[in-house]
Amino acid sequence: MRVAACYTPIMTAQSLDALSALDAHLREDERMVRDSVRRFVRERYVPRAAELFETEQFPQDLIPEIAELGLLGASIKGYGCAGMSAVQYGLILQELEYGDGGLRSFVSVQGSLAMYAIAAYGSEEQKQKFLPEMASAKLIGCFGLTEPDSGSDPASMKTTARKDGDHYVLSGTKMWITNSPFAHVAIVWAKVDDGGAESIRGFIVERGMNGFETPRIHGKMSLRASETGEIVLDEVRVPATNMLPNKRGLGGPLGCLSQARFGIAWGAVGAAKSCFEATLDYAVNRIQFGVPIASKQLIQAQFADMATEIIKADILALHYGRMKDDGGIRPEQVSLCKRNNVDIALQVARKCRGILGGNGILLEYPVIRHMLNLESVYTYEGTHEVHTLVLGKTLTGINAF
Ligand code: TGC
Ligand code: FAD
């Protein structure tokens, strides 16, 4: 005979935010930016999130509102961009990924990768021509570094740019490119002439140039609400004035990645928070053995572990965000933050999936969607292992790649 367990709530439950008390360490302007994006995401995106994921659609109808909120190239100063601080930018990305990693990816790629490349390495003419149009979403950008045979080791890229008069002729294939199917411009990294790592240069390739195609990749079981494609370059003639003049070598694309990885470290925590909140709500209402499953120590232990990791990840992001605003952070610090925060977010999502039981595999709850999305986030912008080796190299001085 089963004995009904005793369940007596003795106090009002505290939210994750109340427990972390991190709000008190944010400035008024930071809270305002966060709250406006939070409203947008929860009112305009969350109600559609499951359907967009299921039907593999990025909501292009929301792009004007995203631009209106100043989220595109948000940390770039001038050229129609919002000029936000690193912490404001991080908070934005956390709210976006609370909605969905695909939404956050769109903003990361447009701002931290495509626009940043032009802002950091472009000529004044290129900045004037492209940045205001990209900030207002009249032009959408993508960032082509990865190739079918060149992922973690981008120095091995095969895409080439051959000088021909006042043009470069680009040939090659880029793979796994976020936003490429509908992008108007692509930042393409290619090897010029001698083929050495030092010869890697960035090019602004514009849709409509002959030989430029961006077939979509279908059937992804992760980030389904993000459009991912290839960039096929078949002898594309690009004016020499479209080459980014102010950077050569792999440090160019990797410098952009440092910006995007910083944002991802914040974003992943948003996904973890969404999973945590939905699962806590579920656990206090789901009755098994006559009581809520939240009254069981095995379940409470999981919430205690998850809350601790989420709050630690938030503190880490805020610490490095403050440092970035106060003078900068080094790439290995970005690696540490991206590696930790994405890893804990994925672990949180998996734990939450378990607590939801069978319901955990339904799109009705946000958990399986975030869990699957985070599998990509674990891999892109430097895999977990790549960041492990960056830290290993930093700590030991020995390159283990
Ligand atoms: P290595 O010799 O270490 O470095 C070459 C040059 O780059 C400099 N550098 C960096 N600069 C800025 N930021 C960083 N994070 C940097 N890391 C390195 C370095 O100082 C050096 O400069 P210089 O002047 O001395 O030449 O290069 P390596 O060939 O040994 O490779 C190092 C390694 C493996 C860490 C790097 O290749 C790497 O990070 N691989 C991972 C590739 C990657 O992350 N790909 C991402 C593609 S984009 C993407 O995934 C977008 S998803 C977006 C979305 O949807 O949200
Ligand atoms: P590989 O590099 O082949 O790695 C395979 C495995 O081997 C991994 O586990 C890796 O960690 C491990 N490994 C590799 N080298 C080592 C080593 N030295 N030591 C130990 N382990 C190692 N790229 C872009 O350029 N632009 C984009 O917009 C973009 N968007 C993306 C969107 C999605 C949804 C996805 C999934 C990817 C995207 N990428 C993009 C590509 C992404 O950056 C790459 O997938 C990533 O860098 C890993 O490359 P790879 O897939 O070729 O894996």
Image (cartoon, rainbow, N blue to C red):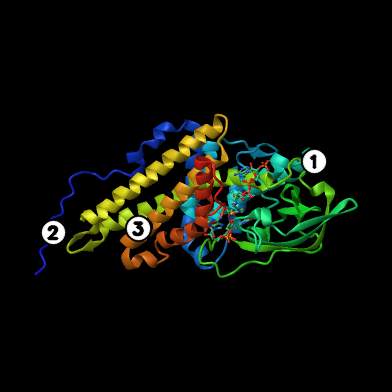
Can you identify the residue that label 2 sits on?
A: 5
Residue 108, position as x, y percentages in the image: 59, 49
Which callout, 2 or 1, points at the residue further toward the start of the chain? 2
In front: label 1 or label 3: 3
At 47% across and 46% down in the image, what residue appears? 38
On screen, 136 above or below 349?
A: above
**How many dots with numbers?**
3
Tell me if label 1 and label 3 are in contact, CB under 8 Å: no
The amino acid type found where label 3 is placed reads: Lys
User: Could you say whether the residue bearing mark 2 is in a helix, strand or loop?
Assistant: loop
Q: Residue at x 24, y 56 (%)?
A: 298
Q: Earlier in the sequence, mark 1 or mark 3?
A: 1
Position above or below: 33 against 365: above
Q: Which residue is mark 1?
A: 125
Q: Secondary structure at mark 1?
A: helix
Mark 3 lies on residue: 351
At label 1, the amino acid type is: Glu
Give how far across and how far down residue 9 sits, in percent.
18, 49
Picture quarter with the N terminus: bottom left
Q: Amino acid at mark 2?
A: Ala
